[in-house]
Image: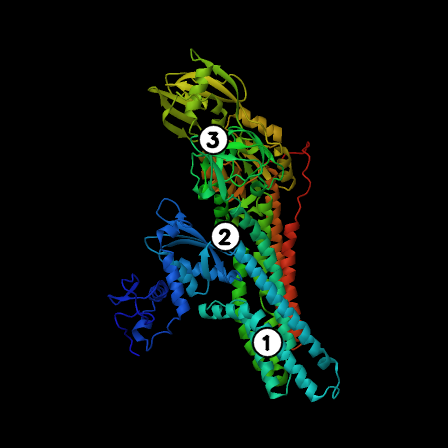
Amino acid sequence: MSNTVPASDCYHCGNPVPTAAPWTITLDEHTHPLCCPGCEAVAHAIVGGGLESYYRYRTELPERPDERQAAKADTWAVFDDPGLQSQFVHPDGDEGNVKATFAIEGITCAACAWLIEHRLNALNGITSSAVNLTHHRLRVSWDPKQLKLSQLLAELAAIGYDAQPYEPDQAQTRMQQEERMNVRRLIIAAVGMMQVMMFSIPIYVSGPGEISDDFYALFHWLSLALATPVVFFSAQPFFRNAWRDLRTGILGMDVPVSLAIGGAYLASSYVVLLGEGEVYFDSVAMFTFFLLFGRYVEGRARHRSGHSGNALSGVLPISATRLEKDGSERILPASELAAGERIVIKPGHGVPADGIIEEGESSLDESMLTGEYLPVTRRVGDTITGGSQNMENPLVVRVTRAGHDARVAGIVDLTDRAFASRPRLAQMAARMAHLFVLRLLVVTACVTIAWWFIDPSRMLWVLLSVLVVTCPCALALATPAALTAGHGQLRKRGVLITRADAMETLSNVTRVIFDKTGTLTRGEMQLTQTNPVGELTRERAQAIAAALEAHSEHPIARAFQPFRDATLHAKDIRSHTGKGLEGTLNGTRWRLGKPDFAMDDATHEPATAPAKGQWLLLSEDGAPRAWFGLHDGVRDDAAATIKALQDKGLNVELLSGDTQDAVESLANQLNIATWHAGASPEGKLVRMKELQAAGETVVMIGDGINDVPVLAGADVAIAMNGATDLARTRADAVLLSPRLMRIFEAIEISRATRRIMRQNMIWSVCYNVSALPLAAMGLVPPWLAAIGMSLSSLVVVGNALRLSRWRPQPAPVPGASKPVTA
């Protein structure tokens, strides 16, 4: 065939090009038509990789895709429809990028995740891609001006992975279908193994001449019949994945597995047809069964963890009861709710969106979100989170965020973001598993050649033993199994890891730094005193302060909410991080905050607070007008948490922007020796850099906008459950629970996870290193190799599952122990 194609045919595959098809490829200053997004993705990948000579010098066109592939191409094009994309594609940042989450079929190990991310990140327009190996999800961010969604899906299909928009219900259904199919494969393999062994045992135990040739032939033919469904049905995933690995050039563990199973089956079938020689159907069936059983156990553990993640995605109820303007109630899909609407939540119903209670008081079950199983009481003015369960009384709620903007949707998105990077140990394990397969095949070829000269009659089963016993299944499962269990345990306890590296860094922490307001304290500020200065009345001062704080997210703003006056509206509000607020009312400039900020006027003398404690000053054009005394209670478990951290040898520090009196008082109360008061956001960051330069690994816990710079600079940043949205997005972990003790538990779980990952790595490497020479010397028969390989994988998974049974030590009772100094 010529190296050119007619203009009406696809330049890549030769198929007819649909009328007005938008797909093209430019080569040698000529634009050539293409028939589908799949050909466009592949053609651009070839040209982009510097392989233009493929088109210039090819002698024939590639094999034409079948009807099934063409149908898939049409399916991909459908996803470019804006109406369809609006259901699962969402904006990502302010640069015009979009993001989406897909459920991926066919993922078996870390090599699959690496291949998907590597191929997608090479596409123009992709800003990030991350595979959630635990839940088999892919989170992608891209520029729609440079890359179409159909091209992205076509690229995934080209390397052997089908993708669908992630929907919790459908994902759970697919997981259940996958599990049922795995059980069927396992049952077939188990029945086949037992029956083949029944026919093999008489051959093994009989002496020469005790079994006639006819019975030998009968047993062999029956074993062939029983092993055939095991190979072609139960072992089908191994062959499918191995073929995909060979096509993509990324060798996974299924390549040696398929070679062992397929080679043993074909060789044994050849012996049966000839009527002489040894057969290995029992080893084939046994190897398939034990490998499937190991993967089934690992899959159950992964799905159990994945179930909690999927359950969180689907925790919002599908319907809601909206209050209309005339007072009537209307039931509608929860996805149609909008901010500002009022809804009724009846007892026993789920909360369909985030909102603020306007009427009623009730107990809510927030265990799905926070891990705290005791109900909490919420009343008028309190914020409630979508996904909670109303326990007692009806509530009227004003919606603040619904659908994809709800907090629970953000939690799922942060969970997927955690897998954008992997701990250093996990990356090393993935690279080792990939390189091990390549070297295993080379070693196997050398062993086979050696046995050809030593004893050709034993060559085949030695080859099988080497392939089977050294399969790096345990090595590939060593870190994902531990990470899955560790993430699940943290999530169960109300700690959401949003960056995968955070778990490894958290295990190496040496110093824990706490902010004060909203972190060690409850963040529930109460106005305890108001001291007017001059002619301003107490009520007027409170109303002006409330107007200034009306648009702030700081915990102090909540203390002034009860004093809001609907007739007062501050304009030109400016927030000075760590200092206070300023704005204008009726043409006058007002400031509320620290005394030196409020009195920023050389014509007035510095003001002094009326007493010790936390005081804010309200000023008018630089003149003092009122003092406000605030009080914030210490969290119930703050003292126990500090002591638990100190008992583990960690340095604890208090770093706050509050006054020296307030910070010193809290530090003495909680037995914290190292504390800093009056720290600005810049000063906090400088202190952080000093500690890191001294070789310390620092964890920072905060909740406000003024904590964002230091959170971004910390080795691990943890945002409290009531943190601002900005602080939460900058954090490496988010507390969903209000309990501070979860921080201590997170450090302990991270250390346990790192310990188990190392144990699994050591066990996997030692097993493969010790098993390889034994198998190469012919000391391990195929059936024993199958058992050994499967047991090694089960040991790794079982060791990782110990994390799911992790229990915290009893919290220490705060006493008169010596404080840990910096």
Identify the residue position indicated by label 1 in the image.
228
**Given the current orientation, which residue lies at the most extreme left position?**
29
Q: Which mark is residue 666?
A: none
Q: Residue at x 43, y 26 (%)?
A: 549
Query: Outermost residue toward the top?
Result: 535
Quadrant where the C terminus sits is top right
Q: Position of residue 719 (x, y in %)?
A: 51, 39
Q: Quadrant of the N terminus?
A: bottom left
- Comes first in the chain, label 2 or label 1: 1
| Residue 153 image position (x, y, % from top left) | 41, 59
Q: Quadrant of residue 737?
A: top right
The picture places residue 668, in percent across and down from the top left corner, at 61, 28
Residue type, numbered disc 3: His
The mark that comes first in sequence, 3 or 2, is: 2
Residue at disc 2, secondary structure: helix
- Please name the residue that numbered disc 2 is placed on: 419
- Distance between the Cα atoms at labels 3 and 2? 31 Å
Query: Where does residue 159 sit, x and y in percent of width and height?
Result: 44, 65
Please name the amino acid that badge 1 sits on. Thr
Packing grade of label 3 (10 A; few <14, some 14-19, many >=20) is: some
* Residue at figure coordinates x 39%, y 61% from the top left: 75
Dots 3 and 1: beta carbons under 8 Å? no
Pick the residue in front: 93 or 395. Answer: 395
Q: Which callout, 3 or 1, points at the residue further toward the start of the chain?
A: 1
